Amino acid sequence: MELGFLVGSIVKILALLAYIYGILWVMAQPSRWVKAGGLIVAFGVVQLGLTKFGNFQILNSFDSGLLFQASAMTMVALGLNLIYGFNGQFSLGQWGFYGIGAYTAADITYRWVNGDARGLVVIAVGTILGAVILTGINKLLNKIRGVPVMSAFTLYLIGSIAAGYVAVMAGKLLFSVFQPLLGTNLEPGILATGIPLQVVFFLAVILAGVFAAEISFLLGVPVLTLGSDYFGIATLGFTIVVNVLMVNSDTILPFPEMKGGRGMVGIPKLTTWFWAFFFMIVVIVIMRNILRSSTGRAIMSVREDETAAKAMGIDIAGSKLMSFIIGSLFAGMGGAIYAHFIGFLSPGSFDFLVGFNPLIIVVFGGLGSMTGTSQPPLAGCSSWKACCAYCSVRWVQKRQPGAMYFIH
């Protein structure tokens, strides 16, 4: 029986390898109709595998769980590959942005299903207003040459704090004024506004990614001036700080629903294969288009030779910051997908040691390779599962043969 399981797992691994190569091949085709048709087929193949036909199902619940987690990890790894593989910045902060996105989206939907729309309002107003303020300050500083980095960072920080304060006030005001509309549950998942929970989930994923990107902007302004190794150390420290804040989110931060180190429960499980596939394809499309644009060529030129790129008139600091922001955006969206699949968030899942997983994927998959980055999360999960399951079954058979009855 264990041999059959191993053979089946190997077949699934090969199928997943062919699947991801097929998606990337479809995305590389010039015809839009071929791309659209290929993506529909790719989505339908997995959806068919997840569909039950009586007692028969190609992909069981464990396989589907691995697939959803691998989709989220693909988004995180692609973001890190943009930062490290294509831009040459050794970052260890990707897991921190992954956690920020997970907790941000989870807080929005958790409050929503409990009849509280303030999470959505505050995050939406804060991210939009923050983006406007940060963009305005950036344009102002571009006109004023020679502003010290820390002075610019102080201005950005003040603007972000102001945006956060206005967002909180807007949340309180809208909550008090529109509570009859926003806070009245017609049925589970739908408030009196008639907005379906899936729409709220979509907005939560987008807002989580944007919020993580804005945090990365604030972090990147002072930190990207450091050398590659020191930049890695600084981003590792950021990941540790984020994890500490997660552990103390119910004491230091005003978020009692996150329950600190005990873990956040009650998150609605809204991640379906449609959403996981949709956002993964969105990330692949955005990254492929960026790399083929002049912005992408500028990002890659910084990796090759900063001096030569600067001599050609490329904004070195701007290219580094751009790749860092976009990579963090992908990580935040991946975290949101993960949170609504698992339904439970624990700070231990975002520990800095676990944060080396995306780095391992990028390094072993190939720096600067989208195919190599997309392949390990999908195929690697299945192969690791097959090896662990086969070895554990063989060990139990040798130690306690009678225990196999209970395992089966």
Image (tube, rainbow, N blue to C red):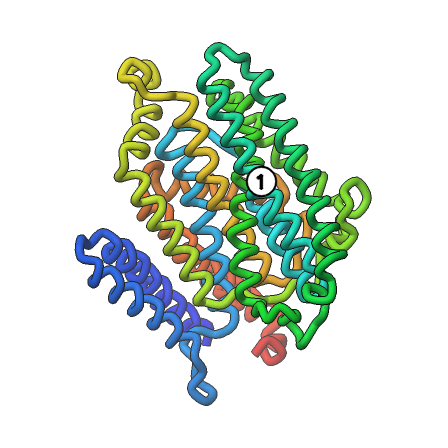
Placement of the C terminus among the 4 image quadrants: bottom right
Q: Position of residue 28 (x, y in %)?
A: 22, 51
Disc 1: CA contacts within 10 A as few (<14), some (14-19) or many (>=20) = some
In the current view of this chain or complex, which residue is farthest to the bottom? 54
| Residue depicted at 47% across the width and 36% down the height | 325
Q: Position of residue 19 (x, y in %)?
A: 31, 62
Looking at this view, is 178 or 262 the one in front? 178
| Residue depicted at 52% across the width and 47% down the height | 209
In the current view of this chain or complex, which residue is farthest to the front? 177
In the current view of this chain or complex, which residue is farthest to the right? 251
382, above or below 102, in the image: below
Looking at this view, is 4 or 147 the one in front? 147
Q: Residue 202: tell me if it is visible.
A: yes
Q: Identify the residue under disc 1.
A: 129
Q: Secondary structure at mark 1?
A: helix
| Residue depicted at 44% across the width and 39% down the height | 326
> Disc 1 residue type?
Leu
304, above or below 84, in the image: above
Placement of the N terminus among the 4 image quadrants: bottom left
Q: Position of residue 178 (x, y in %)?
A: 71, 60
Looking at this view, is 171 or 11 the one in front? 171
Q: Residue 99: tell me if it is visible.
A: no
Report the side of 219 relative to 170 (left or right).
Answer: left
Please tell me in which quadrant of the rendered image residue 117 appears: bottom right
Q: Position of residue 203 (x, y in %)?
A: 54, 56
Please tell me in which quadrant of the rendered image residue 127 appears: top right
28, above or below 403, in the image: above
Please tell me in which quadrant of the rendered image residue 211 appears: top right
